[in-house]
Image (spheres, rainbow, N blue to C red):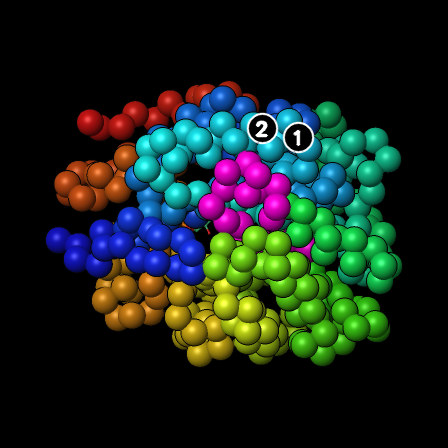
Amino acid sequence: MSTHLFEPVTLGELRLANRIVMAPMTRNRATAEGVPTAIMRDHYAQRAEAGLIVAEGSWPSAAGQAYCRQPGIVTNAQIDGWRRVTDAVHARGGLIVLQVMHGGRIGSRHIKPPGVGTVAPSALQAAGEVFTDSAGMQPFDHPRELGADEIEAVVREHRCAALNARAAGFDGVELHGTSGYLPMQFLSSGSNRRTDRYGGDAAARSRFAFECLAAMADAIGAGRVGLRLNPGNTYNDTFDEDSAATHAELMRQAASLQLAYLHVMRAPVPEIDAFALARQHFGARLILNDGFGIDSAEQALAQRQGEAVSFARHFIGNPDLVRRWRSGQALSKFDRKLLYTPGAAGYSDYPSLS
Ligand SMILES: Cc1cc2nc3c(=O)[nH]c(=O)nc-3n(C[C@H](O)[C@H](O)[C@H](O)COP(=O)(O)O)c2cc1C
């Protein structure tokens, strides 16, 4: 029987009732304008027993939208829609933060409003395609390089996103620093060829993510801001000449801000021990992720590798995951075909056992 997962833990200003975190999952259930819907309210409320929910990657500006029906945290309608989600989660005793995700070069003009371009640290197109509702699969746009003054504006958008998230009732925010989106595009030598203060060595390539974190922390308090990282990640055509060293640098910079937590994913390559790297360069307040089950999570906590563990896929088909684990019940599977489709099917219609 688990002895650690069900214990409370405090991460910055966030007081988790247990150490089972719901990891962020893009599910494309918002409106075409990025407004959260009633089924999103139901989906998150059903999962409110998690010690903390990290709600799906949401854009801080129209240029940052990567996917169809992905929510934003910009307009009044989006803030109102999210408010209905956070109210429902809080009514059930839950805690919820919003992942802020700027897609950068991972985007298509077929997804964004007319005239909104795709931007990146350097004008380098990512290899790959993205699904669009209007034109099917499309290659990622060829991005335009951000000017130095524009970078300042994007940092301000992150600050606004944090303020808007609080206005929408979120308990905090998490910066999406993985999977080849904008912060990781700056971080990685393969997508950042800049020669100004945002490009060059690892310290300079970390600057954009650091400035976003600092702006968010200044706006809502560092104890309500988290960061997600995945050293060694190559998703979305990401390449870095020395991912461990680069991440160690950003972890040290982030540690200086006294953030609520670092949400660190296991490295996909054996040479990098991401949890040890995070422990060494960020310190405590780690949420561990990727591929955990109840036993391996329990073991990781017993070994003090982190303070909490997050789960994504287990939460899809098991809204009552925490209760199932508490009572030793079997887990249900989910339907892959319904991961990103509109509507309640395969999203907010998975039953709880009790
Ligand atoms: C459908 C789906 C959507 C995801 N969307 C996001 C996302 O928006 N942001 C993010 O940081 N990770 C995202 N992930 C990654 C998960 O948060 C998690 O890191 C991954 O699934 C591994 O955890 P697990 O083994 O517990 O599933 C997504 C994963 C899935 C399956």
SS at circle 1: helix
Q: Is mark 1 within 8 Å of ligand 1?
A: no
When asked about the image quadrant of residue 164, the answer is: top right
Query: Is residue 273 visible in this depiction of the protein?
Result: no
Task: Report how far apart the C-alphas of labels 1 and 2 lie in the structure.
Answer: 6 Å
Query: Is residue 138 visible in this depiction of the protein?
Result: yes
Q: Position of residue 222 (x, y in %)?
A: 53, 61
Would residue 263 appear left or right of 292 to someone viewing this image? right
Residue type beneath disc 1: Asn
Decide: is 283 above or below 66: below
Query: Looking at the image, do the residues carrying marks 1 and 2 touch, with CB atoms under 8 Å apart?
Result: yes
**Which region shows up in magenta?**
162-184
When asked about the image quadrant of residue 348, the answer is: top left
The circle drawn on residue 127 is none
The circle drawn on residue 76 is 1
Residue type beneath disc 2: Asp
Decide: is 217 above or below 312: below
Q: Position of residue 113 (x, y in %)?
A: 78, 31
Q: Residues within 10 Å of mark 2 (few under 14, many from 20)?
A: some
Decide: is 317 above or below 187: above
Would residue 34 appear left or right of 117 to someone viewing this image? left
